[in-house]
Amino acid sequence: MSALGIENGVVAGQSAAWSLIQKLGEGDAGEVYLVEGLVTHEPAILKRPRRSVFLGEIRRQAEQIRTEGRILQALEHILKPLQGRVSTPRLLDVSKPGTEFSENQFIVIARANGFDLTTLTRVAQMGFSPAEMLGYTPAEQTFLRELAKQGAVPERVLLAALAAVLDVFALIHTTEWEWNNQVIQGILWNDVKPDHLFWNPYQTSVTLIDWGNGRLIEKIEGGREARYSPVEDLRQFWEEMSRFLWQVHPALLERLEWSTALPDLREIRSSVEVLRQRIERLRLDAERQARQLREEEARLLSPTLGEGLLREALEDVQARLIALGEIPDYENALRMAGNISTNLAAVGDMESIRAVCRWAESLPGSQSAMWQVIARLAEYARRADPAHKEAILQAVQRAAAGQWEEVLWYMLVFLENAPEPDNWQDLVEQVRALALPEDALNVRPLPVLKRILFTLQTTLQRLEDQTGESEGEEAFALRALVEQLQDVTYNWVQVDPLPPHTTIAYQDSETLITDIEHFLPGAGNDLRRALTPLRWQVQDVLESWGRREFILARQGLRRLLALDPDRRRLLRAESALEKAPHWLQQLHGGPQAHEHLSECITRWEYEGREMRNQVGSAGWLDGILEGLKAIRRGTWPGDLLLYQPELVADLPWLTEFERAEEVQKRLYPHMTLRLPLTLQGIQEARFGPEQALSFLEPVDAWTPEARGSSARVYRATYLAGNGEQQEAALKIMRMDKAEYALPLFREEARILSILQGVPGVNPMLECGFLWVGEGFDFPPDHNLGAIQALRGDAVRMGVERVDTFLEQLDQRVREGWAPYLLVQTRRREDNLLLMCDASVTQGRLLPVPQLLLMSIQICEILEEAHRRNIVYRDHKILHYYWEAPQNGIYIIDWNVARYYPEGLTPVEIHMDLVQLGARGLHHILTGRPAPGALPLGPTRPEEIEQAAQQYRAQWTFDDQRLSAQVLTILEQLLSGSYTSVSDLKDDLKRAYLDLR
């Protein structure tokens, strides 16, 4: 066999490599081997020439094998009309090029499924030995056993085989095809035998095998007679199959009116056609009976809830199907038995379940162990206390569905509230055998640990008895180890183990391995080997937990329980995994209207730490817990976005504590805040309709208090840096009050450039000058036409050119140029006067937490201004705007503010804070300014400088709205007790959190 490479058990073809299993035989056409795909493990048949000293003989066999391969390829296409009912073996592989006409040439064909007619006849007439049954499935063994009882090959099988041969002949004898530049007029099987006809009782189909003697019928031109004729196939069919029928089923031969005498070959075609029609008529009748039985079987396998198992009717149908040559649908019968068991478990009919199990266990292909387990579970359920019955009923249902890890799980749930029944551990091992591969069944570390503990206890006792010392160093260390092992083994089986044994990990055991190995060489390694697969499974669960794949983690817990059924704490881990999505949902939604933030934070943190203790750590969970702990300890929630920006995904409500610009800056520190596109450099332009700048309407005339003493403000359009027209607020100095207004304008331009980019400071977009000439006066506010018609020359300067603007300011004003600042426009509806002044809102004030958040943000803006040596001074509610989409306060009008390059003195800070309290926060929180505060309208710098240094609080109904903490803050602020805006901000934050 060396030429084929079979001496090493492997032969390589063009498509695959094949492993030799055994030699099946040899004959005129060569040798036949049973082989198996090296990769696919698919069984197949290999044919090759017999080794011979005669090269001519080898060439003949090789050519015959080659022809068979070509015929099988052709038949795959020719017989497509018969697909599903008749087939021939598929050609799977051929020898590599270069082996033609040698003993190395071979073909590999698929094995035929089912039984050949000769085997069926032998079984029906003579029975079979146990050895003969070894290669068959349980369903096939039952089929053959019933066939032996009946003592005859089913008539339907014989009819199907006869019809298959004649239908194949009708196609292969007349189909033309081309091969080797020759036109082939048809194919001759030339080997009609009962043992070449295979009946597949699963698919009810016939396979025609062994085409080694096949011949190609060449198309003959010029009237010459062909070498082979289809008559030869018809002759073989008549002789072989009539003789076979006479032996196995003479009654059928008689019904077909089939004589064993061969008719005249010149008339054989017509004789066979008459016979074919008789065969077909009987075959169709048998097929009709089989279809009706299959429909009845399907109905019986889908019983209604009220019907249950119709055992006798189903067994009768199954027997009749076998009598027709078919294998019943045992697979669905077993599935039905499982479904019925599930339904019976749902209604608590345990006795019926046990009857179903006994019947199902007798079916071919059933797992006896499975039905024995279901029956035992049903018995435990029957005897269980009704209060604890639900879990064991669930176990029965899962067992009927073959979900063995779930079965173990519900068995554990059952034990949580019920004592362990007798022989329970035997049942556990039975279920584990169904749930796990055989090599995993021995992985049960608790018995290993208990043996180690017992041995060490004995060793300790012997040591103390021999030495008489119980306090020696060796005895002390051994006693400590024994105590630790006792602690571990005790907590191992507890549903609620004591810390530090609460998580699903085995760290408490693994840390003792070294000490165990010291006192008991080899035992530590035994424990390590037992724990290794459990460690891997724990790692899988914790990885799923870390990825928030809670369903996968719960499935992993069930596999872990199958490996270690003593680990009852897994029930608590399951509970944690079940709660986790709801817990995250609660966190995501934040405190509800009726809930207090601090109470929610405390509850969420407790629940989260309990989940961590029950399952184990996870990056996402640890991060959330750190954030919750920080808030509980007083950290401003918005500050978490700076240190833990990833928390916003789980706690999106954190953004409610910060303005949108700050949130974006903290979440995306490398992203530049999007500001309006502004002018760069200096540009000479025109203002007026459709020019670089144009006036639209006044924005400081909506209330008398809004009109400034040093400038007017108009809504205007400007040509932005991208060439598009944008809207902004154009603040232009009043030229009729230049002496008073010029220093204020200069200070505001300088301060806005210093505060450029500070969130909450209304940004300056550009500055510059408009030529208005001497004697210019603004048109009346009601004359919008005149306002919009204003036109002239303009010098526009970008924000980065403020220094140039300041240098030219005095000279330009003397020449008749009016300085302007272009700032971002704000909606009138967002002004706090309209939102917070009690006289405007008719006493309807905003919720106190929202007012406190506004106050906090004003403090943050002021804090940054103080850090840059700027005091705002002109604190009045008219200068504050609240933009809800940005969740932020914006402060406008910085012309009375003052910049101190050398730094702020305590006096300046004191004055700024007192004015903030009297005109700002008091007005925001109570709806009115503090008694004695400066009026709401335009305020000159000297008026602020001469204002009171402290104010006295006077409450009306404010103590019913505001907490004592807020009232105290206002009183201290008005009295001048605060020395820094940071302290005020922190107190406001604490008051805000107490109200959330």
Image (cartoon, rainbow, N blue to C red):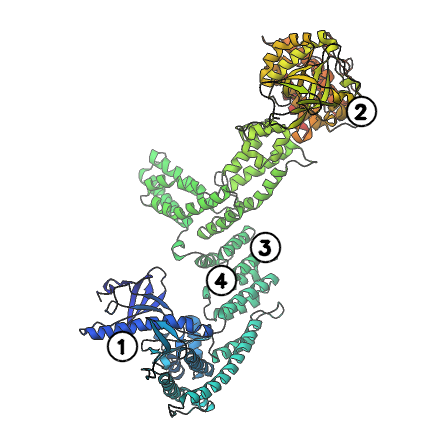
Residue labelled with disc 1: 27
Q: Quadrant of residue 822?
A: top right
Residue labelled with disc 4: 373
* Mark nearer the viewer, 4 or 1: 1
Q: Which residue is most to the front?
A: 222
User: What amino acid is found at the position of numbered circle 2 in the picture?
Assistant: Val
Q: Earlier in the sequence, mark 1 or mark 3?
A: 1
Q: Is residue 909 visible?
A: no
- Mark 1 and mark 3 residues within 8 Å of each other at the beta carbon: no
Q: Earlier in the sequence, mark 3 or mark 4?
A: 4
Residue labelled with disc 2: 840
User: What amino acid is found at the position of numbered circle 4 in the picture?
Assistant: Val
Q: Is residue 671 above or below residue 298?
A: above
Task: Judge by depth and name the residue closer to the eye, 243 or 335.
Answer: 243
User: What amino acid is found at the position of numbered circle 3 in the picture?
Assistant: His
Image side of residue 366 versus residue 388, left or right: left
